[in-house]
Structure formats: C-alpha cells, structure tokens
Image: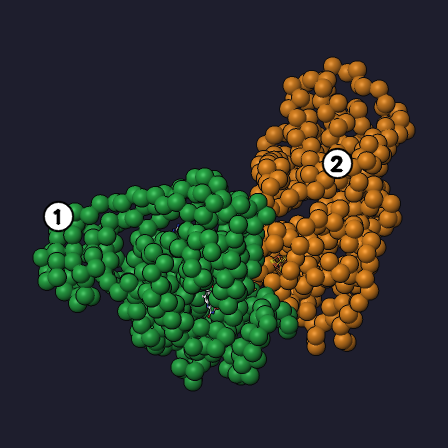
Chain colours: A orange, B green
Amino acid sequence: MSAHVPTSVDPVFLTELLKAGGENLKKCYQCATCSTVCTLTPDHRPFPRKEMLWASWGQRERLLGDPDIWLCHQCGDCSVYCPRGADPAETLAAIREVSIRHYAVPSFLGRLVAEPRFLPLALAIPVVFILAVLALAGTLTLPKSEIVRLADFFPHAWLNGSFSLVFLATCGFALLGASRFWRDLQRNWPVPGTPRGLFESLLPVVNEIITHDRFSKCTAHDHRYLAHLGVFWGFICLLLATVVAILVILLGGDYPMPLYHPGKLLGNVGMVLLLSGGYVLLKERLSTAGKTSRSTYQDLLFLSILLTVTVTGGLVQVTRMANSQSAYYLYFIHLVAVFYLLMYLPYSKFAHVLYRTLALFHARRTGRL
Amino acid sequence: MDKKTILVVGAGISGITTAIEAAEVGHEVVLVERLPYLGGRVAQLGRYFPKLCPPYCGLEINFRRIKNNPRVQVHTSTELVSIRGDRGAYTVELLQKPQYVNDRCTACGACVEVCPVTRDDDFNYGLTTTKAIYLPHEMAYPYRYAIDTSVCMKLECKKCVDACAYRAIDFSRQDQRFEVKVHSVVLATGWTPYDATKIENLRYGSYRNVITNVQMERLLAANGPHQGLILRPSDAKAPESIAFVQCAGSRDDNHLPYCSTVCCLASMKHALEYRERNPQGKAFIFYIDLRAMGRNEDVLSRVKADENIVLIKGKVARIDEEPCGSLVVEAEDILSGLKRKEKVGMVVLATGMTPNLPALDKVVVDEFGFFNAEAVEEGIFAAGCDKAPLDVSSALKDATGMALKAIQG
Ligand SMILES: Cc1cc2nc3c(=O)[nH]c(=O)nc-3n(C[C@H](O)[C@H](O)[C@H](O)COP(=O)(O)OP(=O)(O)OC[C@H]3O[C@@H](n4cnc5c(N)ncnc54)[C@H](O)[C@@H]3O)c2cc1C
Ligand code: SF4
Ligand code: SF4
C-alpha cells in the first residue's frame, strides 16, 4: 500500500497551533538544524524539520496522522540550536496537544480540559458526581464516630462501584479516540513490505516505556528523563497499591492495611517517587519560562492534578492515623483529583500514555524505530 | 577649489579607495591604519571572486597610487582615539604605537634568526607562527619588519638590535599621541571573522581539521602556509574530500542574526579552487540557501557543472572526529528527506563578518553593530564593510561614494 499524502491545508489548524504553544513556528526557515541535533529521531525522514514545514502550511491531516510527533519527548535540544528561535520542541508539543483534542470522543470534553476558562466547570463535574454518590449512599454528612474511618464517609462498595463505572466509560471513549488515531497512522504511514511481528514490535515498546531508554538520550534537559521515570514508576506503584487495596477489601482482609503490608509499602514508595519526580518536573516547567521547553496550561494543570492526588493521598494517611477529622476533607479533595485524572484521561495530557504508546508500536512495526 | 583635509580610518580596500579618490581630486587625506601594513582583509585572501584571480594585483595598483600621491599621509600602527567638534572642524586624536622598526629596515631578516620568541601568525589566522619580530607578509606595504609588542621582551632581550646591521631597531621609541584637524571623517574599519569557537556544535578549536573560511583563503594563497597547497592541519596531508558548512554562525539568532552575503561565494570559490588543485578530490557544500547575486551567478554555474562538487540543502549541525583525524559531518538532506552523514578529510566553516567600528560617542551603530546611516552625524561617514557585509566590488562603489560625501559641504 502506498502512503496517502494528505495535501489539504487548514488555516484554522495553524491558528490553533499558534495558540497551543507554537507561536514561534512561523519563524522557521527550514535549515534542518533541528533534525540533526535531535538525538531521538530516526535517520530516515527525520523530525522535526518536516513537521515545522507542515505546521506552517496548516497541514492538519498530515500532522495528526504523523507518528513522529509522538516520538519526540520535548527535550528541547532542537530549540536550543534552532537559529531562528522557532521553538520546534514547543511546536511539536502544541501539535500533540491539538492532536489529543482532535481525537477526543466526545469532543466537548477535549475542549473542557483544554481551555482555562472551563476549569471551574471541569472541576465541578467530579465534585458534583462524588457528592451525588455520597447522597445516594446516605453518607453526605461527616461520620460522628470517635475513630476516623474513611469507609464510614465513603463506603467501599460505593466508591469502588462508582469509580469503576466511570473508568469503564473512560476506557470506552479512549478506545474510540485511539482507534481513529491508529487508522490515520496506517493511512499516512503504511507498513513498507511486511510488518514486524506483534511481539517483536511490542517488546521494545514495553522496554522503552519501563526504562525510558530513548528519553534518556536527550541532552538539553537531561534530568527531565529521570524525573519522568520517577513519576512513571511512582504512578505504577500507586496503581498497584490501589489494586492490592481493592483486593484486600473484596477478600475481606484487614483494612486499612497496616504500614508494613506490602501493598502499603508499595504505595508509599510510589508516593515518594512520584512526588520527587513531579516536583522536579513542575519546578522546571515553571522556571524555564525563557528559552526552551515553555509550558502550556495543559502541562501545568496535569502535573498539578497528579501532585494533588499524591500529596492529599499522603496527608490522608497521616491525618487518619492521627485520628484527625481533617482526614475526611483531605480524602474528599483526594477523590476529586483522582476522579479528574480518571475521567479526563483521554483528553488531558495524560492521553500521551495512549497515543505515544500506539505511535511507538507503529514505529516498531513499520521498522521506523 | 576649496581644499579640505579628510581623515580616513582603516586602510583596507575601502579606506584606500576613499583616500585615493579624495586625494586625486586635490584634497588632503590622513589615512590611519592600526596594523603595520595596508590592505586589510583583502591582503589575506587567496583568490578573488568573481574572476578567481590573485587579489594582490588590485591592491598593488592602489599602493602605487598612494605612494605617488603626496596628498595622502599614511600612519600605520595607528588608532583613532577620539573625535571632537563638528562638520568642517573636527579635531581628532590619534595614537601611534611605538615604531620600533624604522625606515632603515631593508627586510634582510637577520633579526628573525636571533629572536627567541614565537607568536601565532594572525596574518595566517593562526595556521603558522612567526617570531616576535616579523615581516607581516611578503607583499607587505610598507615593506618592513614589525614587532609584536604584546610578546616582545624588548630591552630585556634586544638580540635583534644587535643583529641588525642597519640600526633599524630602536626600543627607545614611545607611544605617540597627536591631533589633526579635519573637515570630515570616513570610517573604513572593516570586519573581523566571527569567532567560530562560539558555535560549539561545529567543534572549531577542538577538532584540528575543522578550519574556517578565512583560514582556507590562506591555504589557497601562494604566500600562505603551504605555498598554495591545500593541506589539512592535523597531518599536513591533502584531504581527499572537504565539506563546506554554510551559515556557520550566520543567520542565526544565537550568533550573527544577519547574512554575511559573501560566504556562499567564498565557499564556491574554495570548492572550485580545491577541485582544480586536487582533481581526485570531492567537495560537499551544505547550505540553507545558496546566495550568489548578480554576475556572481557565473560562479554558481561553474560549481553546478562540476559533478564532484555536491550541493546539499540542509545545515550541518553535528560533526564527529575519527581517530585518523577525518570528520563525519551530519545534516538532513532536505530535498530527499534523509539524514546524510558524510566522511570527509577536512571541514571548512563558512563563518560570517562582524563589524569593527570604534566605540566612540559620535559613531552610532545599528542593532548588529554596523554603522547606522540613519542616525548619521553630519560629517562622519562609513565606507565598505562598516555599513554591511559586502564583497569587494560593492565595497569599492560605496567607498568611492563616501569620498564624494566627505569632500562636500
Ligand atoms: C572568507 C571570505 C572570502 C572573501 N572573498 C572575497 C572575494 O573573493 N571577492 C570579494 O570581492 N570579496 C571577498 N570577501 C569580502 C572582502 O573580504 C571584503 O569585501 C573586504 O575585505 C572589505 O574591505 P574593507 O576595507 O571594507 O574592510 P577590511 O578589509 O576589514 O579593512 C579594514 C581595515 O581597517 C583597519 N582597522 C580596523 N579598525 C581600525 C581602527 N580602529 N583604527 C585604524 N584602523 C582600523 C583594519 O586593520 C583593516 O586594515 C571575502 C570575505 C570572506 C569572509
Ligand atoms: S525549526 Fe529552527 S532548526 Fe528547525 S528547520 Fe526551522 S529554523 Fe531550522
Ligand atoms: S552568504 Fe550564504 S553562507 Fe553566508 S550567511 Fe548568507 S546564506 Fe549563509
């Protein structure tokens, strides 16, 4: 199958990119310094020079089905050396952001998380949802018991039940978006000859995700990869800890789990990893206001929510053990933030786990990586 | 005719032209040059586009015109210190560095034999060394030895004084400050090559076989380091191929934001000369845009006609060195969309030109440091590369025009 080369031009797309952080992309004069200094690009049709050209032409279709925008980790090597200050790293980030919005199903949720003016509404949805579930469960008032027990506030069955439902719905929407992206990938970048086998393609992807080996080749912001690795593994630990907790509850085990319980230990290790990595990332995002790796509203919001989940989670644990009533309030904030992460997964920056993974898989399958 | 005195600062091809044009119509000219010899950067060129002839013929004609014209007063090793007053009545202060070697010098070279100190030869852009007492170059005008005061041990050593049979060396000479009254001033202080060590990813200064275009000019010159043979620095062997890296630090916000206008042609000239002298050699020119204006397009046509000069659209952004001293240059070949890694024997960086204007109140510069013609002070003008990076023929036209400006009013 020969590659479909989309030639359509969409001026609105260009405006969207300029707003999403690509405001300097028009300065590009196609020297290709960026494609050469990039340590992550393949040699065959390297990025990001071609993306810069397509972006300034407003070639939406071509860019959205371009796996390369996801092979980039915004190390910023290209932006440091770009002779024109065109910020290719930031432009690719903007394309990714617009891309996530493009594939969002339903599309209004994409807009909801993308625009700062909708933030109150975006936060109100989880708040109202949780309050409604509490009302249904009949626990809308704070428990009066002497000992702080979170289950008295939000009964486990209601918590697990309602959150699982939302998660299922999210997964459904995510799959729809992902399949549309996959279709575009295959249309724009068909497999030349026979594709690599499924496992042969999948293994290196898994390896790359768990070791961040490609990310580690960045030179301009070399500690970013370590920080991201921390966040990634912290998140995985916390996810596993949650699964363990749910199992313990379902099997009628000792809950809350004692501190030395492996599930608990895993959770606390995860918390430390995520907090330290997240702190470094956030600090960097806030401090590199100047030269490279400018951050957008989306970058900052996503990191803040992730950190809120972690910090409130830790505080709930401490206040609960100290038997302080504030545990209930913190727990409430914690749940709102967790809900936010879950519900907006396919629309926020979190969606990169989906699209990047697919693009990496595609790149391995087609032999691009 | 009302006879006026004009100060011309800088005796490169532009300053010499302004000086001669003004003097030949009857005005007095004070021409000051901070180096011990005249000619500026053109004296250092190896070949001269568009005709690819040796550049010295043009300079020599001009030196003769200066020599034969009593109205041009030349001060070498002299710098401009200050300008006071207004158009029609400027008082300028000049500072001449001690002239340790005087007119009695016959350039016999006895001093060089005994001088114990060596220095980098800036005429050859550091490709060779000289003694602290040296002849600037074989065609130097004035033709006499000079002393590099920054390294010379003077009276502590004075071996040269004893060796000189003509008693041409005198360490008792001091700095000389003097003032002249002039009608107008023409600055023709020219340019300096951009410091290539600042372009870290191109490795000038750390890889020996990465040289700059001005060094390449010296390699081409018959009075250059190897009498015109193009040999690379690490092992003095002829490189089997050369990569030219265009816009090295030019058109780059991190370095020089402007186009230096001549470096494309300079590299084309270098490639043609290299190919002529090394028929087996191969040249690669990596460019963003190849700029050859006006009749210089002929040079581009000659380059295109040679199948062993490969033009690649895409800027070199990475260079690696192999143990043998050869280099691998890397760029994206934009027209094919593929990465290109080319192993070559030597790399020439096409570095740009930075202005040399003196920092004086009355000299107003633009954002890039060139003379700002809009904010010009009545009576102070700039010629040639003080205004913008120019090739010689454009600089000459400009310099002639400035002679007219300077004698008006
Ligand atoms: C690699 C390269 C190759 C080139 N090849 C060609 C070519 O083939 N053909 C062509 O047409 N052009 C060529 N050019 C351009 C050419 O070199 C310039 O056009 C030319 O040198 C301009 O002469 P100028 O007199 O304006 O400046 P300069 O040659 O720089 O002369 C300025 C003079 O002023 C003196 N000076 C500086 N400051 C002071 C001061 N404060 N007081 C007193 N004196 C001072 C300097 O010592 C110098 O002698 C080339 C340029 C480069 C970079
Ligand atoms: S983004 Fe910058 S480095 Fe890349 S091609 Fe454009 S101008 Fe050159
Ligand atoms: S003349 Fe050519 S090499 Fe020099 S700055 Fe201009 S475009 Fe670049």
Residue, far front: B1
Q: Residues within 10 Å of mark 2 (few under 14, many from 20)?
A: some
Q: Quadrant of ligand 2?
A: bottom right
Q: Are marks 1 and 2 on the same chain?
A: no
User: Residue at 76% across / 63% down in the picture?
Assistant: A62
Q: Which residue is mark 2?
A: A338
Residue type at the position of mark 1? Glu
Reply above or below: B380 against B192: above
Position of residue A109 relative to residue A132, above or below, is below
| Farthest residue, direction right | A136
Chain of the residue where label 2 is placed in the rendered structure: A
Q: Where does residue B409 sit, x and y in percent of width and height?
A: 53, 50
Left or right, A129 with respect to A70, comes to: right
The residue positioned 60% from the left and 62% from the top of the image is A31
Task: Assign a secondary structure to mark 1.
Answer: helix
Q: Amino acid type of disc 2?
A: Val
The residue singled out by tag 1 in the image is: B156
